[in-house]
Amino acid sequence: MSAYKKMLVAIDLTEEAPQVLNKAKAISSAHGAELMLVHVVEPVGYAYGGDIPMDLTELQDQLDKAAKEQLAKYGDEYGVAKEDQVVTVGRPESEIHRLAKEQDVDLVIVGSHGRKGFQLLLGSTANGVLHGTECDVLAVRIQ
């Protein structure tokens, strides 16, 4: 197996993110790989189904700003360069696929709650990332 050179770590900025980051940091250290932190903010319109006839730009901007601040804290704590900290807006699976390809990533690391049965049929970000990424994917089990 060849060593990984660039790893994309997609986190959701919850209290569970350090579980994924600790695993990613250990793997990147073992391989001498560069880490890239990514958080995808879903468009506010998705949450409301686009049915609200109002401008949600300010709310979206606030969510983006808060995500960038939180991601920067994790980036500083885990030694990830500012240029490798990315907050983007869109569908998580699609944005992770796009970034992995654009950035020539060897490994995508995501957290997984290990849902089974009907919950798995409904889909999850980890499952969506797995089925469309051209590189290796590691789903870190969240405890």
Image (cartoon, rainbow, N blue to C red):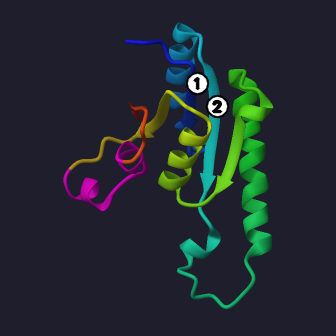
Q: Which disc is residue 50 wearing?
A: none
Can you say which quadrant of the picture contains the C terminus? Answer: top left
Could you tell me residue 6's position as x and y percent? 58, 24
Can you say which quadrant of the picture contains the N terminus? Answer: top left
Res. 70 image quadrant: top right
Let me know if residue 119 is in the magenta part: yes
Task: Give the labeled residue for mark 2.
Answer: 36
Residue type at mark 2 is Met
The magenta segment: 117-131
Other residues around mark 1 within 10 Å, as few (<14) / some (14–19) / many (≥20): many
Pick the residue in front: 90 or 3.
Answer: 3
- Residue ID at (62%, 67%): 43
In the rendered image of this protein, does residue 14 appear above or below residue 19? below
Pick the residue in front: 14 or 99.
Answer: 99
- Residue ID at (72%, 30%): 75
Q: How many marks?
A: 2
